[in-house]
Amino acid sequence: MISCMAGLIAAALAWVGNILIVKRWGESGVIWIVPVFEELAKTMTALLLGGSISFVHGVFGLIEAVHDYTSSGRLGLWTALAGLTSHWVFGQVTYYTIIYTRLWMAGIVAAALLHTYFNYIMIRFFNSDRY
């Protein structure tokens, strides 16, 4: 239950933060700032509330998947699956990096780097504005 609540809180924080980031920095913000902000939100809410890092990332990914499905037009199913899968993977990277290094910040950095690369690929090669 705590992990669900932490995932919802992280998603709400990311929703507000992402709106502000995109408004200020646009596509560059999505690539370079949003990943760091989201990984901080997910992992810190899990750690501060005592939830499961993997589960919080999964809840966050599910919420993002629903949003993507309803707002991405004909690519909605694929963006939803990509969002759900990627956030689950980011959670695994975070969790195992923390286990291996015993440093929570290392987990956030590792996931943020992967998330940045993922966003870059998605925007550069699969931008829905091109379809």
Image: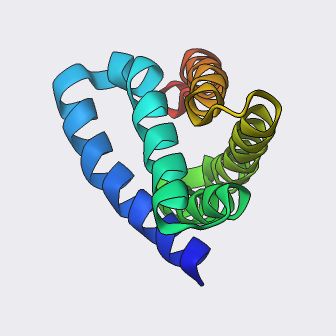
Measured from the top left, where is residue 120 in percent x and y?
A: 57, 17
Residue extending furthest bottom?
A: 1
Measured from the top left, where is residue 104 in percent x and y?
A: 60, 36
The residue at the point 33 percent across, 55 percent down is 13
The residue at the point 40 percent across, 66 percent down is 9
Q: With respect to residue 127, does 66 lie above or below? A: below
The residue at the point 46 percent across, 70 percent down is 8
Q: In the shown orientation, is residue 23 left or right of residue 34?
A: left
The residue closer to the viewer here, 41 or 65, is 41
Number of marks drawn: 0
The residue at the point 54 percent across, 27 percent down is 127
In the rendered image, the quadrant that contains the C terminus is top right
Protein image colouring = rainbow
Q: In the shown orientation, is residue 64 left or right of residue 32?
A: right
The residue closer to the viewer here, 27 or 106, is 106
Measured from the top left, where is residue 33 in percent x and y?
A: 38, 24
Q: In the shown orientation, is residue 31 left or right of residue 92?
A: left
Res 119 → quadrant = top right
Q: In the shown orientation, is residue 127 left or right of residue 57?
A: left
Measured from the top left, where is residue 130 in percent x and y?
A: 52, 24
In the rendered image, the quadrant that contains the N terminus is bottom right
Res 107 → quadrant = top right
